[in-house]
Amino acid sequence: MILSDREIRAALARGALRMTPPPTLERYSSMAVDFTLGSDLRQWKELNTMASVPTIRPGSPHFHAPTLLDSLTEQIRISDAGFSLKPGQLVLGWTIEKIQLPEQSRLAARVEGKSSLARLGLGVHVTAPIIHAGFGFKASDQNYEGTSIQLEIWNVGLWPIILDPGIAICQLVFEEVHGTPELGYSGVFAQQGPQQP
């Protein structure tokens, strides 16, 4: 069952989920909350600057996505002029907002694009919308703010699109999980965010 705006606010009030900073009322729609783009992106390195062109084999037992991303992308800060996302270009970004979904709360979420941006050809996730129950939660650390959502942002339109920090880039839809999961999310992206300078 998808939570309404009223139920999302009730879940926040009872501590069943946490968003830092808490969303203002303008960020809510009937059943979603807008999240905004942070200042840092990971941009793929140009193939012509690399000594050899890598072949990526996700089925290999040695494949480790974070290591691969560290070696084939570079972190950049969006300038005051914004970042021009060219047609066909893919970058990785993070939301300003951080989230915690304690598994005992039986809540999960989906990150979805905004229709106003989709109509321009801007996508925010490449078939990876699920935010698992337990994501960003550390029971042992009451001061932990949670984890940013990493976005796979790509331009399938015909024109460059300027990305500015703080733009409402995506929306989160919250759902009830039937039953309490035995395991909280502990995948390789359990704690993610831009590298601190």
Image (spheres, rainbow, N blue to C red):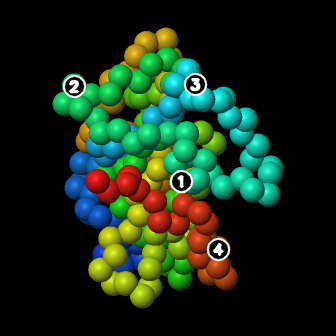
**Amino acid of disc 4:** His
Disc 3, disc 1: CB below 8 Å?
Answer: no
Disc nearer the start of the sequence (3/1): 3
- Please tell me whether mark 4 sits on a helix, a strand or a loop: loop
The reply to whether dot 4 and dot 1 touch (C-beta < 8 Å) is no
Q: Amino acid at mark 1?
A: Arg
Alpha carbon separation for disc pair 4 and 1: 16 Å
Q: If you read the primary sequence from the N terminus, does the residue marked by circle 4 or circle 2 appear first?
A: 2
Residue on which disc 4 sits: 178
Please say if the residues under marks 4 and 2 sit with CB atoms less than 8 Å apart: no
Quarter holding the C terminus?
bottom left
Q: Is residue 80 above or below residue 13?
A: above
Q: Nearer the viewer, mark 4 or mark 1?
A: 1
Q: Position of residue 196 (x, y in %)?
A: 32, 56
Kindly indicate the quadrant of the structure image that contains residue 36.
top left
Residue 30 shows up from this direction? no
Instruction: Give the amino acid at mark 2.
Output: Ala
Q: Secondary structure at mark 1?
A: strand
Q: Report how far apart the C-alphas of labels 4 and 2 lie in the structure.
A: 46 Å
Between marks 3 and 2 in the image, the one whose residue lies nearer the viewer: 3
Q: Which residue is mark 2?
A: 81
| Point 59% across, 71% down: residue | 185
Q: Earlier in the sequence, mark 4 or mark 3?
A: 3
The location of residue 174, given as percent across then percent down, is 49, 60
- Give the residue at mark 3: 47
Which numbered tag is attached to residue 190? none
**Residue placed under numbered mark 1 in the picture:** 110
Q: Amino acid at mark 3?
A: Leu
